[in-house]
Amino acid sequence: MPSLPTDNLQLNEHGRLRHFLTIDGLGRDLLTQILDTAESFAALPGRPVKKVPLLRGRIITNLFFENSTRTRTTFELAAKLLSADVINFNISTSATSKGETLLDTLRNIEAMHSDMFVVRHAQSGAAHFIAEHASPRVSVINAGDGSHAHPTQAMLDMFTIRKHKGDFTPLRVAIVGDILHSRVARSQILALNTLGVSEVRVVGPRTLLPVDARALGVHVFHDLEEGVRDVDVVIMLRLQNERMDGALLPNEHEYFRLYGLTDERLENAKPDAIVMHPGPINRGIEMDSEVADGPRSVILQQVSYGIAVRMAVMSMAMQSQSDLKPEARPDQPPEAGGHA
Amino acid sequence: MTESTLLMKHDAILDMIAGMAGVLRKHLDDRGLDDPAIIGIHTGGAWVADLLNGQLGLSEPSGLLDISFYRDDFTQIGVNPQVRPSKIDFDVDGRNIVLVDDVLETGRTIRAAMNEIFDYGRPASITLVTLIERSGRELPIQPDVIGLSPPLGDGDHIKLEGPDPMSLEIFHGPRTGR
């Protein structure tokens, strides 16, 4: 049964994006609108003044409970290119480490007039929790919550794919690596299927694939060469060192031997296949340098596109706030009627 | 369904633009504004700009401005997903710019366009050319060269359709009481 716009926390009653928390529950039209909007922003860096005044005077707060210089910096840059003011709330040195609850942190920052929160948290569901409790005038963007979702990464990956391949429908896409622990992979799979690609494959050792992988709408491969055969896009995921400590893998050399992307293995893919990676790359583990720096790698472009996509999501979410009626001031009656 | 009246057809519009080119040339010469560079505002202004460019025999292609990111009504209408990137291939610094739009009404589009031009550089001057000038100004913005100033009824809205063929249509909407 399709969910009504009002059921979906992310959309306001006009179907506009209010929070961006997960790809789940968003339709193809809305995802396409995000990509189209990002397209306009992608053209800006060529100008002498890279900024536009769209969000001038708005305050965007980065609430990063998990350390991430790279993602935080791209969100900060995206906000600044929209002329918004940015506050970075570094949680590890803040009151939260002194035992303040998440809700108290939220209320305190709202009292500082923030219009938007960009949230990264180690707990799955944290961004939803904040969105549920945020005041009506605040929008929440999920920059990654636990192992649940990383929707802006997925959208910049979709943008990259569309830039190079155009139409999604005939594409075969392989996602390689630690799918089990990857919020990026979850969001990518949802986005690829919503946008209607021909096939999504996940490739990795059994210990790093979810048991219910097929329920995600993907084909499972344990052999890399077979997994990338005839694909149009190869997305390599970052292997986190903790996986080796947890005895899910023998060691990183073994991982590279079986699942590392090399030019030789890439020969199985389509001749014009592109190679993607959310970054940062572990050279010699996920892929060797020939691939990372080779002609099919679009990894650096993903970074630039990430700024445009985040600008798109922020401006769309900020704009939905205009659907709110101005709060009646206590000393004034509500407006009797509209004006021209 | 909104009623509309055809005000002017393609050939008549071309003739009008040819006339405007002559007035523009004199305006620029009288003021010593040499080596002008034309910038048209997407979409209708860009069509007129290209035609004027041809009439004046300029060597550079006209620049294109999409003012969507500079509009003052973002909170009402939001980001248009079909924004075309602005494209100005010449250096704006020190140039005598001719800014071209199809319809001048409130003046807000021109305000946004000038803000955007100044993000590209510091022009020596800006001359404003508009195909249609109509009542309804909300900002102190005045055109230098006008094609036509048609008197319009209450609730009327004029639009340049095009690019091929072009036509000027007046759409009759409900009275606004302005």
Image (cartoon, coloured by chain):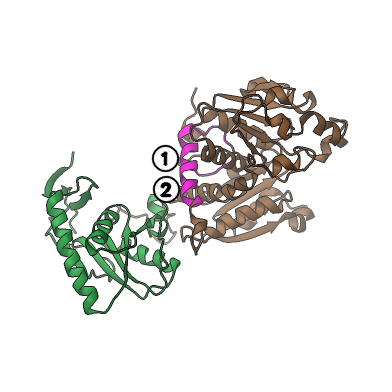
Q: Are marks 2 and 1 in contact (CB under 8 Å)?
A: yes
Is A327 included in the stretch rendered in magenta? no
Q: Is residue B141 left or right of residue A318?
A: left
Q: Please state the horizontal and vertical placement of residue A207, each as a whole percent of the image.
A: 80, 26
Which residue matches tag 2? A323
- Of A46 and A120, the residue lying toward us: A46
Is A22 included in the stretch rendered in magenta? yes
Chain letter, colour brown = A
Q: Earlier in the sequence, mark 2 or mark 1?
A: 1
Q: Give how far apart the Cα atoms at labels 2 and 1 are.
A: 8 Å
Q: Quadrant of residue A153?
A: top right
Q: Quadrant of residue B18?
A: bottom left
Q: Residue at x 15, y 54 (%)?
A: B13
Label 1 crowd (10 A; few <14 / some 14-19 / many >=20): few
Give the amino acid at mark 2.
Asp
Q: Chain of mark 2?
A: A
Give the amino acid at mark 1.
His
Q: Colour of chain B?
A: green
- Of A177 and A276, the residue lying toward us: A276
Q: Please state the horizontal and vertical placement of residue A276, each as a whole percent of the image.
A: 65, 39
The region drawn magenta spans A18-42
Q: Residue at x 69, y 48 (%)?
A: A102
Which residue matches tag 1? A14
Residue A10 visible at all: no
Image quadrant containing the C terminus of chain A: bottom left
Q: Secondary structure at mark 1?
A: loop
Q: Is residue A299 left or right of residue B45?
A: right
